[in-house]
Image (cartoon, coloured by chain):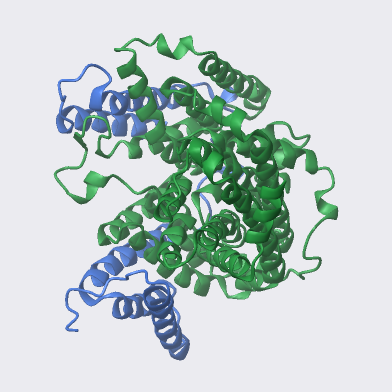
Chain colours: A blue, B green
Amino acid sequence: MKLGGTLVFVASVWLWLVQTQIPDAGAEWPGPRGFPQLLGVVLAALGLLLIAAGLRPPTIRGRETSPTNGEGPPKGARHDARVALATCTVLVFYAFLLDRTGFPIATMVVVVVTMAAVLRMRQRILIAGLALGLSLACWVIFNTLLGIPLPSGAWNPW
Amino acid sequence: METIVSAIGAATTPAVLAATAAGAVVGLLISAIPGLTFSLALILVMPFTFAMDPIPAIAMLFGVYSGGMTGGAVSAVLLGIPGTPSAAATVFDGYAMARKGEASVALGASVIASAFGGLFSLVVMMLLLEPIAALAIRFGPAEIFALVLFGLSTICGLAERSLVRGLVAGVLGLMITTIGLDEIDGVARLTFGTVQLQQGVHMLVAMIGLFAVPQVIETFATHGRVTAEIATEDVRGLLPWSRLRGYWGLMTRASAIGTIVGAVPGTGGPIASFLAYDHARRFSRRPEEYGKGEIGGVVAPEAANNAVMGGALIPMLSLGIPGDPATAIILGGLLIHGLQPGPLLLQTDLDVIYALYVTIVVSWIVILLVQVAGIRVFVKVLRVPAHLLGVSILVLCTIGAYAARNAIFDVYAMAVFGLGGYLLQRARIPVAPVVLGLVLGPTLERQYRTALILSEGSHRIFFESPFAVAFFILTAAVVGWQIWSSQPRQESNGLSRDA
């Protein structure tokens, strides 16, 4: 039910964005808007279907909705959510640092932050070793040997 | 006959063999790294071929292509992250096998299936080059649209327990592909004025975010539990021949699917592997085992995505039309070396064509040897504690996302998709159909709109072609069968999982 409602809401926002953000281009249907519009309508329909399924009597719905049957939120869901949020924040921070400090420094900092703050590890030598090793190994393999340009950073003086 | 002997001689010189082997190893290694595709490997290797003669240069490119096709399965099996989009379908059972302690069996099976698929398609290509090319070239937008729609029907098979949730995932994937510059009218769609979004969301970036980041989150949240299970495996028997008894028919059928799909321009490995996976699951005596570590779920997509190579080369060599991005890069490589693929190539440079056949066979032998020798090394990857591996994967994923377009924006996008992937998992929406939508979305829309432009807005074009009608009927049959076959399960289990 909650998921169905969320999907209908997402579909509504999507359709509004399609209508306001995509120029008509004067083309006949489908044009640039047609396909995204169609997808928004299909998503809304699927959301309504989920809502309808959620409104069925509990006897038909069976055991699924019961939180005691093992299909409810997984154990440690809050912990997982915290880890997920922390990991994605680290990634955003990584992107920010890559742009400024370049790959080697950004990677070292991010590895240290991930291991110390997200994984709550306290083995300083292991953390320092992995941060340094991973950063340098990736730089040498990708940037130097394979010729894949990695970000050198806007603050890089050389 | 004289041409064949001369071609064999030209393709087995030490220089050509070395170039083939080097290309195969590079392709294998690069595509084994999540986020780095063999298309990238081909582009990286291309400058090295400039100074070479045409045959060693082509041999190296085809070595990369063959190696790259099979390398994606390594990270799919060991890490649960497809190294290439073509290996996405291999994750479901390959990774499940690894979690059950059968990583080396899954890898061995994938190597054998890959080689089988590659060689199968080569034989088919050699036998049917001209007739299949003639058939594939007749596919217009309506037929390709119908084929892609048929490919999308595999969502039904990937939907796990809820067809509706699977469809939601597929639609979400299709929605993502509409962001960016519209290919036909050149109109910016949902870019919010940002230059970075005009190129759209890079499929690879979205895939890394959706597949890899939730995986990293899981390893961080569970702290090595997964690795401990896998690391206990005692690696014995590098090639699981005995386990493959009963699967040769499936491999042959999957290879045929891959070859046919590959021959249709605009399709490619991901479509073939999903179709083959769906075929394997659907016609299995134990469909419920798929997704839980069934070996058929590894061999079918691997045979199919490697068979795509031979199929994709048919229109590329005979008509100059690349079947997928990789063959488009190879086409560029051939042009650099003064070879113009097309009907004339078959007449003027037949020795090059035959030499190419030989180099493909050689590259498969090299890949087989490297993979067999490397299985123990690959499996050892799992002995690293999961959370440390997770940190390394996070860095590699960031490199992969950045390298896709050399854009920091893509790293931000990967983080967003990572969170999205995690939320989808929490909402019990399967990720695989999202990927299918991402892969098929651009082709689906482009061919649909092109067909309508050609027919001046009339939908009759889709029903005038017997091929298109056949694909529509197949699509309807697959969806109908899925709804019918899931009916008793829904009655017993209840529909509320959709609630």
Q: What quarter of the picture does the N terminus of chain A occupy?
A: top left
Residue found 55% across the figure and 56% down from its top: B62
Q: How many marks?
A: 0
Q: What quarter of the picture does the C terminus of chain A occupy?
A: bottom left
**B497 or B172, which lies in front?**
B172
Residue A106: give x, y in percent of width and height. Answer: 30, 76
Q: Would residue A80 be seen by someone viewing this image from the given angle?
A: no
Q: Is residue A70 left or right of residue B324?
A: right
**B83 or A3, which lies in front?**
B83
Q: Is residue A92 left or right of residue B219?
A: left
**A155 or B38, which lies in front?**
B38
Vertical placement of residue B378 versus B211, above or below: below
Q: Quadrant of residue B21?
A: bottom right
Residue A122: give x, y in percent of width and height. Answer: 44, 85
Vertical placement of residue B306 versus B100, above or below: above
Residue B360: give x, y in percent of width and height. Answer: 63, 54
Residue found 44% across the figure and 23% down from its top: B140
Residue sticking out furthest to the front: B2
Q: Would residue B226 be seen by someone viewing this image from the given angle?
A: yes
Residue A141: give x, y in percent of width and height. Answer: 44, 77
**A6 or A158, which lies in front?**
A158
